Structures are given as structure tokens and as C-alpha cells.
Amino acid sequence: MFSELAKGLATTLKHMFRKPVTVAYPEQRLPLAPRYRGRHFLVQDEDGLERCVGCELCAVACPADAIYIEAAENTDETRVSHGERYAKVYKIHMLRCIFCGMCEEACPEDAIFMGKQYELASYNRDDFVYGKERLLLPLREAAKQRPELLQPGTGLGMGQQYEPAVPAPASKM
């Protein structure tokens, strides 16, 4: 009986002098991982045109069916994107989204990316359906979260592979 009591007291004393693990959020914030996937954004280039060409590949790639797009044709009078088409309606249902990043990988134009924001709380369910006006972000603001967006084609778009920082060891045959 005394040995169990001594073990319990030793455990208590050991933990009493450890540094606390608790972080006083929101005053203190832990650093995010470099490839953290947070809230979605659509990139708007410096000339005011959207990168999204309305191809709907992100909506097709989404396993949660959280993205809805209606595409429309660009005209000479009203040019919205660089391509022939643009996303007239672009909505992401954030309560359905599983933040997997498949939409970002499927985009051939690097138009959609997942930023570092993770505070998405609201009292109204309708606030979680993000329309185009909430998703659009100018290129310079987007580059603060993802610097590789300044060079189109360097993100993790279609056909590009992620290369780890440390090369894999060579196998011996």
C-alpha cells in the first residue's frame, strides 16, 4: 500500500515541475506547419483578372462535393479571366469541406489555394457558404501566405510533383 502511494506521489512531483503544455490561445498561437491547409482563396492577378478559368476540375476532384461552379464565356467587353471562360458563380461549402487539398492539386491555373486561416466560426450556417466575393484575394495578399504563387506553374497544380527537402537515400542493388 505504501509503495503505491509513493509511486503516485513521485508521479505528481515529477509532473509538477514540468513546463506546462497549455497555450493561452488566442494571445499565444502555435506556429503552423509549412504545408498547413486552411481556408480557401481564389487568386486575382495584379491586372485585376481572375486566374480561375471555370474549368470545374476542382469541383470534380473534391471528394466531399463542397465546390459549386457555374462557368460563363468571356467577351471582349467584359473580360473577367485570362481564358475563354470564367467562373460566373463559385461557391465553397465550408461545412462540407474536409480540407484535403485535392482542389488545389487539380487546378491547372494555380487559381485556388488553401491559406493559413483556420478561424472559421460563425453563428449562422449560411455564413459557411463562401461565395466568390469572399474567396477572391489579390495576388500580393495571396503571396504573403503562399510565396510560390508569384511564379505561376510552380505550385502543386496538375502534373507537378512535390519534392521533399531531403533527398531519399539511394538503394543498393
Image: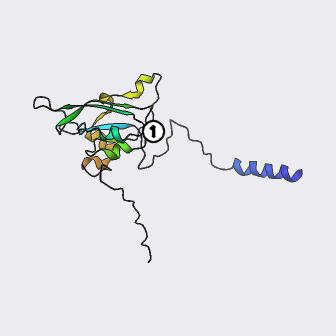
Q: Residues within 10 Å of mark 1 (few under 14, many from 20)?
A: few
Q: How many marks?
A: 1
Q: Is residue 70 left or right of residue 6?
A: left
- Up-down: is 117 above or below 165? above
Residue sitting at 51 percent across and 40 percent down? 28
Tell me the SS state at disc 1.
loop
Residue 47 image-quadrant placement? top left
Amino acid type, mark 1: Ile
> What is the x, y in percent for residue 121?
47, 29
Residue 107 image-quadrant placement? top left
Q: Is residue 122 left or right of residue 153?
A: right
Query: Which quarter of the rendering shows the C terminus?
Result: bottom left
Q: Is residue 48 visible?
A: no
Q: Check the image and name the residue furthest to the right.
A: 1
Residue linked to disc 1: 98
Q: Describe the colour scheme in one phrase.
A: rainbow
Residue sitting at 36 percent across and 56 percent down? 162
Give 117 or 57, whichever is nearer the viewer.
57
Residue sitting at 16 percent across and 32 percent down? 74
Q: Is residue 77 visible?
A: yes
Q: Check the image and name the residue furthest to the bottom.
A: 173
> What is the x, y in percent for residue 42?
30, 37
Q: Check the image and name the residue furthest to the front.
A: 60
> What is the x, y in percent for residue 97?
43, 36
